[in-house]
Image (cartoon, rainbow, N blue to C red):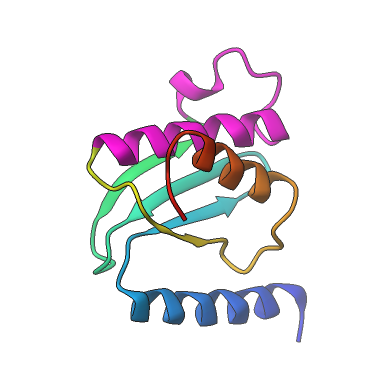
Amino acid sequence: MDKNSARLRRAKSTRAHIRKLAVPRLTVHRSGKHLYAQVIDATGGKVVAAASTLQKSINEGLEGTKNLTAAAAVGKAVAERSIAAGVDSVAFDRSGLKYHGRIKAIADAAREAGLKF
């Protein structure tokens, strides 16, 4: 099993558990250049809030789009937008990625901005 299929297997297992909980989920995606985060409602059919380093409001003043400060900016923005949309408690879906580095920075910033998970 290669790295990507192992990651997808972990992600599938996590998403199945979150579906049983029936709560909105904060999902993250990490590409080579950018970071993305979105809050998806409990049914899985609608994006409640989203933020990424592609958005000018987030990447203004950042030195790069794939470092820890960019991750913190994305986490803070998605939390603020989610709370404004009426969702303040979520389950964290890290997409099978390890909980460290940029993924941890997104989660910590979202927690500091008031999102509960």
- Name the residue at the top extreme: 61
Residue in the image at 66% along x and 73% along y: 7
Check residue 115 for magenta coloring: no
Where is residue 59 drawn, in percent x and y? 55, 22
Where is residue 67 drawn, in percent x and y? 72, 34
Residue in the image at 57% along x and 61% along y: 94
Q: Is residue 53 visible?
A: no
Query: Which stretch is magenta?
Result: 55-84
Q: Residue 60: name its quadrant.
A: top right
Residue in the image at 75% along x and 74% along y: 3
Where is residue 51 drawn, in percent x and y? 43, 37
- Name the residue at the bottom extreme: 1
When the figure is inspected, residue 73 is found, relative to residue 62, above or below; the finding is below
Q: Nearer the viewer, residue 58 or 110?
A: 110
**83 relative to 97 in the view: left or right:** left
Our reading of the magenta stretch's main secondary structure is helix
Q: Nearer the viewer, residue 17 or 29?
A: 17
Quarter holding the N terminus? bottom right
Where is residue 39 drawn, in percent x and y? 37, 51
Q: Is residue 47 visible?
A: yes
When the figure is inspected, residue 42 is found, relative to residue 56, above or below; the finding is below
When the figure is inspected, residue 112 is found, relative to residue 24, above or below; the finding is above
**81 relative to 28 in the view: left or right:** left
